[in-house]
Image (spheres, grey):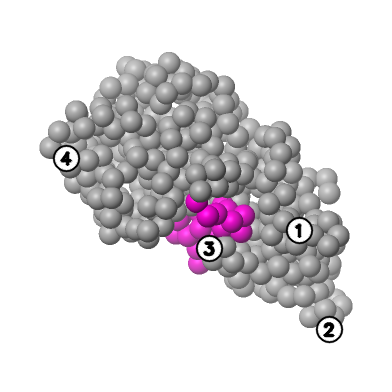
Amino acid sequence: MNQTPTLYRAAVINPLNNGNWRYLPDAGLLIERGRVVDLQPIGAFGARPELPCVELDGVISPGFVDVHTHWVQYRVRGRFQAQLLPWLKEHIWPEEASFADSALAGALAEQFFKDSIRAGTVMGMAYSSAHAGALQAASDVTLGDWLIGDVVMETDAPDALVAASAKDIGELSARAGRYGPQRYAVTPRFALNCSAPFMRDMGQLARQQGYYVQTHLSESVEEINEVHRRFADAQDYTDVYDRAGLLGERSVLGHCVHLSPREWRCLAARGSWVAHCPSSNEALDSGRMDLTALREHGVKYALASDVGGGPSHSMLHVMQRYLDQHRAAGAAVAAGEALYRATLAGAQCMGRGAYAGNFAPGKRADFLLLPRLNAHQSVDSWLEEIVQGGIDDLETRVAATWLGGIRQNGTR
């Protein structure tokens, strides 16, 4: 943590809420003890010549937040193309089985978090494999602020993964207790890997101990049909989780591509969050989440990469796919909204909105540096331009990233 007050001089964009921001073309961002003290036009600091000043060439933005990713799929991101269930069984679960090797898990976890920081992601929610050792390996090398959970795969999965998974709520509670609610998320992989009784136990644990819940909901039609067959007494897929007590304000549900009006109403009533994964939905041909229905029902959401279904860990790439997909379908979306959904909304989703996600005084100084605006370029056009390009370009577009005011990487 940076103990000395330091003034960073650059252009600054500060997301305020959905689609609104404050942009200062020549600003001073004052950091002390890893926290934001003030953000003002640079002239406001003229009376404090004693402040060390770091001048940066570019635009300072809050760090990105990725509220749904699988760090154990990072090595195979974007490598396989198939429908969801065959993709899991033929490619992803065999890959995750290799994380029984804790040394391998440690090396790959270190690479995942290092690359995430390099791409500007400073916090998020991640799915680990079913192995307790892999979860520990990730926890040991985490960079930034993360909620991580070992997936519960109680049934209908390869024997090795079922064997590695927590067998009952006692074992899961013990695993969770090593990390606590600020670092651990209860993670039933999806309804097809869990029995109704175990899901009820997980819901009770999360409610009583204050844990976040992360899981998948209605990603593919084939998945939904199988859930209907397996849980015939439930009204729909969402009702399976609702009956288990897994839906609440600390529940983050990945995808939600094929929801009925009743399901949208249920999520809104429970105050649950949707982790919107446009790049993954596109890559696995899962369909487009109905953004209009989500908005009409007032459901909260933030953006996410869903690596390895998503081909890139870059939130700039996720923002690009978000804009392109919904615009192609005739939905009104703005680049400023994409920025909010990849920063402050993600922090709010994780319960960190009071101390992360933008540059309000007192918040953590987790930020990144993006290329500056061209002469006479508007902020809107810059926001549109900053998310253009191929995956390789977007993964390296962030010039540097800071955690708690400490620079982590970068050369500019």
Image marks 2 and 1: residues in contact by CB distance under 8 Å: no
Closer to the camera, 184 or 324?
324
Closer to the camera, 328 or 138?
328
Vertical arrangement, residue 269 with respect to residue 224, above or below: below
Q: Where does label 4 land, which residue?
A: 234
The kind of residue tagged 1 is Val
State the image coordinates of residue 214 (x, y, percent, origin top left).
38, 44
Vertical arrangement, residue 205 with respect to residue 154, above or below: below
> Which mark lies nearer to you, 3 or 1?
3
Q: Where does label 3 land, which residue?
A: 18
Image marks 4 and 3: residues in contact by CB distance under 8 Å: no
Q: CA distance from mark 2 to mark 1?
A: 24 Å
User: Closer to the N terminus: mark 2 or mark 4?
Assistant: 2
User: Closer to the N terminus: mark 2 or mark 1?
Assistant: 2
Q: CA distance from mark 3 to mark 1?
A: 20 Å
**Label 1 neighbour load within 10 Å: few <14, some 14-19, many 20+:** many
Q: CA distance from mark 2 to mark 4?
A: 65 Å
State the image coordinates of residue 295 (x, y, percent, origin top left).
41, 57
Q: What residue is rendered at 60% in x and 51% in y?
A: 64
**Label 2 neighbour load within 10 Å: few <14, some 14-19, many 20+:** few
Q: CA distance from mark 2 to mark 3?
A: 34 Å
Q: Where does label 2 land, which residue?
A: 47
User: Closer to the N terminus: mark 4 or mark 1?
Assistant: 1
Q: What residue is rendered at 64% in x and 58% in y?
A: 62
Q: Quadrant of residue 195?
A: top left
Q: What's the mark number on residue 59?
A: 1
